[in-house]
Amino acid sequence: MYRKLRNCLNLAAWGFAVLTAVGLPRKSMGQESKPVDAAVISLPEAIHRAQQNEPAFAVAKAAQKSAAIDRYLASAALLPSVVYHNQMLYTQPNGTVQGVQSGTQASPIFIANNAVHEYISQASINEVVGLKGLAEAQVASANAARAAAELEVARRGLVSTVVSLYYSVSSAQTKQRVLDEAFREAKSFTDLTQKREEAREVAHADVVKAQLQLQQRQRDLSDATLAANKARLELAVLLFPDPRTPYTTENAGPPPALPTREEVSSLAATNNPEIKSALANVLANNAQVTAAKAAYLPDLALNFSYGIDAPQFAKNGPDNIRNLGYSISGTLDIPVWDWFSTQKRVKQSALRRDAAKVSLTAAQRRLIATLEEVYAEASATRDQVDLLDLSVRTAAESLRLTKLRYSAGEATALEVVDAQTAYLSAETAQADGAVRYQTALAALQELMGTL
């Protein structure tokens, strides 16, 4: 027996040494482990973090920047371009000679080439003047404006998602706290009924009723804890590299004031990105119609070249003949016949323009309807906040009086359980009402462009 005890002690000492060597945390007797500090995340910070981590918003942001570059390129295409062209050609001679400005030289075997040795070193300036280039620049500018509006649409959609998840976390945490208090209240009432049963003041049925209530509250608390963890993980996916990072949301303060309808309508009409996107789409399609019609008109191409194009790579050739010089050319291509292709492209662009106009009017109607719906929701929930607060105070007072009456033997256990249920329902409704108002107010701020 002594040998077995000694072996066990040696094994325990060896395990302790291993834990010490690998640096695992140890908890001494009477010492509690400290919880990991959880960061408090405000709503603006949550939105900022989500904008850095959400892929759809990143795609919209990249599209906006790409459209801005396309607008720059389209504008730059309207300006003259400069190219410094250098080329050396060698062509096999055909055995004869030809007369040139500097005398005679061997004739190249290819008649398209000017000489057996030809050197070209020229700066060339090119410019194309036409309505099509101007229309394409307008299309690129309108597309850039539409991409910027779509980025704002994506941003507000992300904000709406973050707001919904943020207040879902806040609501879940509040309900978890409320159910925890309800669980403790049910446990306290169960203890009270057991003591009164032991004192032969109440029947065993009161204890059974209280225990059933306690078990129900325990299940509710477990479900609320699970819901709170799920809500936190859903939001944490947008906020942290590791969704398991501990964090909490800010405590909801007093409900802010509701803005006036005139203020909301004015800002919503000015800052609505859906209307801006639809309007930019109409402008882009108008410019595309103009670009399609530009195919009926000629384009003027201008060229100015300065440098050398001679058999010698030199400023002057034999007998001091000047090789350095310039040339100017102008080309005007007049369209004559293309088998009605231009007409079909114009019709195609006009169809897209008409569809874009319908989308614009639909966006305007949708804004009016959304504004009315959201403002009515915010106004109604704001009016209910005070009523919900009053209901919580009334239910709390009812529970207190019912418990006093039960302690005095004037009320039944069923009445206490009903009062506890009413108080829990009132607190849950209060939490839902606060979140509902905050969400509706955030939706109004999104429409106004202030969030």
Image (spheres, rainbow, N blue to C red):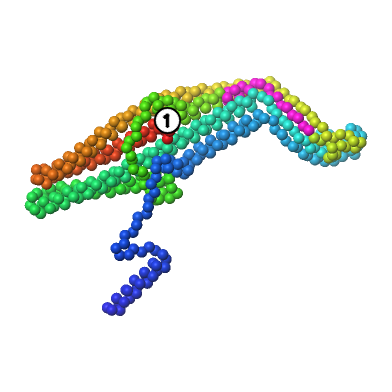
Residue 10 in the image: x percent, y percent?
34, 74
Instruction: Look at the image and say whether residue 133 sits in the magenta stretch.
Output: no
**For the point 48% across and 34% down, which residue is it?**
152
Amino acid on which the number 1 mark rests in the picture = Met
Instruction: Judge whether residue 98 can be spotted in this image.
Output: no
Left or right: residue 152 versus residue 397 is right
Left or right: residue 108 versus residue 293 is right
- In the structure shown, which secondary structural element does the residue marked by tag 1 occupy? helix
Q: How many labels does the image show?
A: 1
Would you identify the image quadrant in which residue 324 lies?
top right
Would you identify the image quadrant in which residue 402 lies?
top left
Quadrant assignment for the N terminus:
bottom left
Residue 263 in the image: x percent, y percent?
40, 26
Left or right: residue 392 versus residue 404 is right
Residue 339 in the image: x percent, y percent?
64, 22
Identify whether 338 is placed above or below 108: above
Residue 416 in the image: x percent, y percent?
15, 43
Identify whether 268 is placed above or below 197: above
The residue pinned by badge 1 equals: 448
Would you identify the image quadrant in which residue 340 lies?
top right
**Relative to the observer, which residue lies in front, 49 or 151?**
49
> Which residue is at the far left?
200
Left or right: residue 219 versus residue 438 is left
Instruction: Look at the image and say whether residue 299 sits in the magenta stretch.
Output: yes
Identify whether 449 is placed above or below 9: above
**For the point 36% across and 69% down, which residue is it?**
16
Instruction: Judge whether residue 330 can be spotted in this image.
Output: yes
**For the point 64% across and 23% down, which residue is it?**
131
**Residue segment shown in magenta:** 287-306
Quadrant assignment for the C terminus:
top left
Identify whether 207 is placed above or below 424: below
**For the point 70% across and 29% down, which residue is it?**
127
